[in-house]
Amino acid sequence: MKHFEKSTKLDGVSYDVRGPVLEEAERMQEAGISILKLNTGNPAPFGFEAPNEIVRDLIMNVRESEGYSESKGIFAARKAIQQYCQLKGFPNVGINDIYTGNGVSELITMCMQGLCNNGDEVLVPTPDYPLWTASVSLAGGKPVHYICDEQSEWYPDIEDIRSKITAKTKAIVVINPNNPTGALYPKEILEAIVDVAREHDLLIFSDEIYDRLVMDGLVHIPIATLAPDRMVVTLNGLSKSHRVAGFRVGWMVLSGDKSGAKDYIEGLNMLSSMRLCSNVLSQQIIQTALGGYQSVDELLLPGGRIYEQREYIYNAINDIPGLSAVKPKAAFYIFPKLDIKRFNITNDEQFVLDFLHEHHILLVHGGGFNWQQPDHFRIVYLPKLDDLKETAQSMRAFLADYRQ
Ligand SMILES: Cc1ncc(COP(=O)(O)O)c(C=O)c1O
């Protein structure tokens, strides 16, 4: 019998958010142990429901959605996305600059497949949402990590970005608001990134899937609005803001000056056609979702679930000896720092594995986000307060005598 090996294309590609620790959690579950899974930003299992209007519209449009659509998506959905971009001030977005996708995930892999020739470098943040790093590698490119600085609210370190540019650097990826840190970038930082892109002729990719999940009265600024003279590819979707991660609905928008990117755009069009189209039924809800009343807003205000859970977990984490965390301003993640000297920690994956075994709670280690030191982990703070309290109390008890 033939022996089927892993494709060598996958060498060096890692995606540890769904890695060995999750496998161990699943093994424990199969053995009858119940696990609190705080490893993915998936709102539905934590009792966040999709708005009724979305579900109604989905049902109303089932018959309309039986056939393939145009590869970039149905007109009404793309029109709604275009108008959303107009209201946010994106420059130069026509209907043909918009591609719908089966989640942002599909579009991340698509836009990197179309970009990278062997050895091309793409600047990606560390910590990052690891699909970006994995997609650059899978496409034959080389992810080069620039530091986001915990001392400065987790903002990208502009000097570090500059120091990592080479003749092979083609593009820079920005994740704003950020997963896993919950950071929201101010205008000055975004402008500085655009300046670097201008100086070195880089494409900008901006993952803005959390742009409707911002707290404390702050305002999200799309980097595209600061770069009318550059081509910016902005990605967004409904998984988080409308609590429909399972529907797989996202989009990608090309804005600004596209004159230097004709070949790349041709490649994107081909890749988009090759997968025929994204889920047509899911496209039907984009217009409803982006217009009118935004039910997510209530969750982000004092008294709302996401806001109150953020307040709780931020205070609880900072109250545990040996832990500290920057307050997240957006999304639903916190990325605490461990005092590794105090706990003698050298392996962050072992740390989350030990915690899983002892307390049956699944977290993701910092390395899962391409963070190089073994001194961070991520908590998804979507669970109800009682579960978050259990998590914080378990962590306090665990760290009281944990040494590696
Ligand atoms: C920053 C970021 N981008 C993209 C995604 C993927 O979203 P989608 O469900 O649209 O594929 C996630 C999901 O956690 C994310 O955190």
Image (spheres, helix red, strand yellow):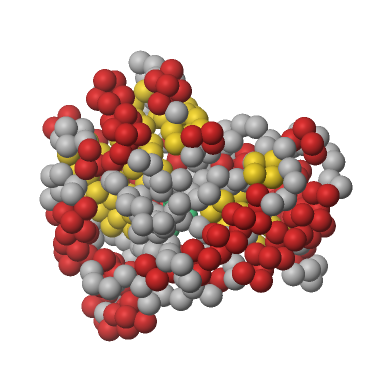
User: Residue 152, relative to residue 245: is it above or below?
Assistant: above
Residue 26 pos. (x, y %): 71, 61
Report the label total.
0
Q: Residue 375 falls in which quadrant of the image?
A: top right
- Quadrant of residue 112 within the rendered picture: top left
Q: Residue at x 29, y 50 (%)?
A: 252
Between 72 and 131, the residue placed more toward the observer is 131
Q: On the picture, is 129 further left or further right than 279?
A: right
- Measuring 62% from the left and 55% from the top, which residue is drawn there? 315
Front one among 84 and 79: 84
Instruction: State the quadrant of the C terminus.
Output: top right
Viewer-proximal residue, 160 or 272? 160
Q: Is residue 296 visible?
A: no
Asked if residue 317 can be seen in this view, the reply is yes
Residue 160 screen position, x and y as percent: 45, 23
Provide residue 301's location: percent of width, then percent of height.
Answer: 42, 66
Q: Write down the quadrant of residue 403 in the picture.
A: top right
Residue found 32% across the figure and 80% down from its top: 53
Q: Answer left or right for 225 relative to 238.
A: left
The structure residue drawn at horizontal position 31% and vertical position 24%, both measured from the top left corner, is 196
* Residue 32 horizontal/vertical position (percent): 79, 71
Name the residue furthest top. Answer: 167
Name above or below for residue 100 compared with residue 297: above
Quadrant in which ligand 1 is drawn: bottom left
